[in-house]
Structure formats: structure tokens, C-alpha cells
Amino acid sequence: MNCRRLLLSFTALLFFVVVCECKKPGTCPPILYSSVCKHTCLSDYECPGRMLCCRTFCGGSLCNPPVSRRVQAPLGVKPGTCPSKPRGRWICSSRCSTDRDCGGNKKCCKNRCGARACMKPEEELGPEI
């Protein structure tokens, strides 16, 4: 009888864990390039503080800080233009998907590798006098 009760309790607990999708507020980076290809976490609540359980490009998962989402402008577009010549580090993983993912006045622009990263917009020149 004890085995049956234990099995029933385990089944109920398993059902609760599967039904409860435990998510913290925030968003994982669009693609997380990492050498971690195994699951180091299965849900956000296995990660400390505000960190989220994010997928890596090779199918694993690891705890990562959320991408900040600050509402700055309608549709996530901030004033200014991205640099005409991509600059910044040669990091080939996107760290943002829209301007809203970037802090301050930074915009989500393509870097040298073609991935998206937060950058300061180009200085806009006023009309010549």
C-alpha cells in the first residue's frame, strides 16, 4: 500500500511540475552563443536572482542575465541612425533584436560580424549655415 501511495504522490508532483511553466520576467538574448551544449538548468527558477534559463545555439541551456526591455519609443524604434560602417567587437552573436533591448539612447545595429548589438547612434549633423 505504501508503494502505491508513493507512486501516486510522485505522479501528482510530476504533473504539477509539468503543468506549471515557471518563468521569471524578462527575455533571454535572441541567440546565446556558448560552448555549453548541455542543460545546466531546466527552468528560470533554477537560476539565481533575476537570471533566466536561456537556450544556447547548440541545444544546451544556462543561466544568463535577461536582456533589458525599456519602453523608450513606440514600436521600439529610437531616434538616430545606426553607424554607416559597422563597428565594435567581432562578436558573432546577437545581443539585441530591437532598440528597446538597448539601454539609454543606444540602438540595436549590425556589428562587423553581421550580428546585432547595442551601439551609440551616429551623430546627426544639423543643416549647414
Image (cartoon, helix red, strand yellow):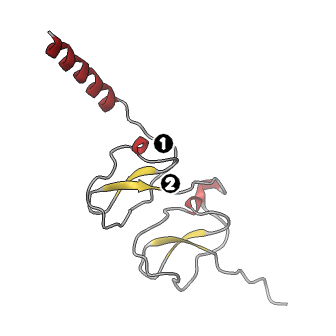
Q: Is residue 2 above or below residue 118?
A: above
Could you say whether the residue bearing mark 2 is in a helix, strand or loop?
loop
Question: Camera-side residue: 79 or 101?
Answer: 101
Cα distance between the residues tagged 1 and 2: 9 Å
Which mark, by number, is residue 24? 1
The residue drawn where x is 45% and y is 54% is: 28
Count of numbered tags: 2
| First along the sequence among labels 1 and 2 | 1
Residue 33 screen position, x and y as percent: 36, 67
The amino acid type, in three-letter code, at marker 2 is Pro
**Residue found farthest to the top:** 1
The answer to whether 85 appears left or right of 42 in the picture is right
The residue drawn where x is 53% and y is 83% is: 87
The residue drawn where x is 40% and y is 70% is: 93
Which mark, by number, is residue 66? 2
Circle 1 Cα neighbour tier, 10 Å, few/some/many (<14 / 14–19 / ≥20): some
